[in-house]
Image: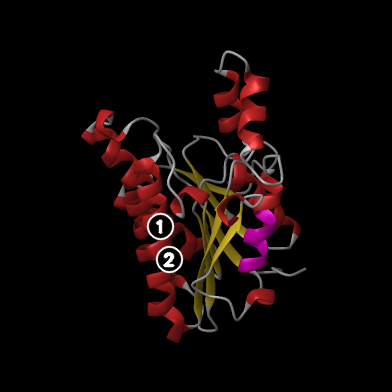
């Protein structure tokens, strides 16, 4: 197995893409420490190491790193799957909403990097940041989210250069619309959910949404030795959306 006995930390692991990444890593033999906002670990693996908390809180991130050091030792892979989306016209957004989306996507990722990457083993490590296609292109009513996810891409690229001498690779997966429970719930709030989903699918060259498992496949590749010469890269998993 490609990640056998590799110690990995996955954020945002209690649902959606993060949960799919955890499943892939588990299958590949990794030792996992998961974190998310939900108070309880995923039901299918209740005995797995799981720490609930807010990654905007530096004290919590420091406790997460301490738990990793105590229970795993070193950390060979870190995957950042957490984040918060905020929609609406830029001039209608409040300062508090702007702060929340920037903190939850960008500054929290900085905190995880700061506290967890010192635990990388001597032979090196891999970090994969899950950004978004909207970190690469703009979209009406998504300006703040684009700014946060674009900032995450820039943060990852800078870290890739800074940490290359330590053989720590940092890469980005940029998913398009993915059928997570959050997106499915957003569709259901529309007057005609099926029609709205078709509308969104028609904006994608492959004419469908991604599955969380497809995004997790890309994360797994960038985490594994098969991508050992890849760092500072952004891999769109968006059905061709950013190819326009």
Image-based side of 4 in relation to 40, left or right: right
Q: Residues within 10 Å of mark 1 (few under 14, many from 20)?
A: many
Q: Are marks 2 and 1 in contact (CB under 8 Å)?
A: yes
Image coordinates for residue 159, horizontal then vertical, percent: 40, 71
User: Residue at the location (74% across, 62% down)?
Assistant: 28
Q: How is this picture coloured? A: secondary structure
Q: Is residue 73 visible?
A: no
User: Residue at the location (67% across, 46% down)?
Assistant: 205
Magenta stretch, residue numbers: 216-222
Q: Residues within 10 Å of mark 2 (few under 14, many from 20)?
A: many
Question: Which is nearer the eye, 176 or 40?
Answer: 176
Which quarter of the figure has residue 8?
Answer: bottom right
Q: Is residue 208 above or below residue 111?
A: above
User: Residue at the location (36% across, 53% down)?
Assistant: 106
Question: Which is nearer the eye, 159 or 13?
Answer: 159
Image coordinates for residue 57, horizontal then vertical, percent: 31, 47
- Asked if residue 221 lies in the magenta stretch, the reply is yes
> Which residue is most to the left?
95
Q: Is residue 191 above or below residue 206?
A: above
Which quarter of the figure has residue 30?
Answer: bottom right
Q: Is residue 44 above or below residue 114?
A: above
Secondary structure, magenta segment, majority class: helix
Q: Secondary structure at mark 1?
A: helix
| Picture disc at residue 156 | 2
User: Residue at the location (70% across, 39% down)?
Assistant: 44
Image-based side of 152 in relation to 206, left or right: left
Question: Which is nearer the eye, 125 or 240?
Answer: 240
Q: Secondary structure at mark 2?
A: helix
> Which residue is most to the top?
191
| Picture disc at residue 152 | 1
Image-based side of 62 in relation to 237, left or right: left
> Quadrant where the N terminus lies?
bottom right
């Amino acid at each position: 197995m490609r990640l056998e006995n590799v110690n990995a930390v996955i954020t945002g692991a209690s649902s959606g893409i993060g949960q799919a990444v955890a499943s892939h890593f588990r299958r590949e033999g990794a030792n996992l420490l998961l974190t998310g906002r939900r108070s309880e670990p995923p039901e299918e693996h209740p005995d797995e190491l799981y720490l609930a908390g807010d990654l905007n809180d530096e004290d919590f991130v420091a406790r997460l790193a301490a738990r990793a050091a105590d229970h795993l030792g070193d950390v060979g892979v870190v995957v950042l799957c957490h984040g918060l989306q905020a929609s609406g016209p830029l001039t209608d957004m409040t300062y508090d909403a702007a702060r929340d989306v920037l903190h939850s996507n960008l500054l929290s990722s900085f905190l995880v990097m700061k506290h967890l990457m010192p635990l990388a083993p001597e032979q090196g490590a891999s970090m994969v940041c899950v950004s978004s296609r909207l970190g690469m292109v703009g979209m009406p009513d998504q300006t703040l989210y684009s700014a946060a996810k674009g900032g995450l891409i820039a943060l990852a690229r800078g870290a890739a250069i800074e940490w290359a001498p330590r053989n720590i690779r940092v890469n980005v997966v940029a998913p398009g619309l993915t059928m997570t429970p959050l997106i499915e719930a957003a569709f259901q709030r529309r007057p005609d959910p099926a029609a709205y989903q078709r509308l969104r699918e028609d904006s994608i060259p492959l004419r469908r949404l991604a599955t969380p498992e497809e995004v997790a496949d890309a994360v797994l590749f960038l985490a594994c030795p098969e991508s050992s010469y890849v760092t500072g890269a952004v891999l769109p998993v968006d059905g061709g959306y950013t190819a326009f």
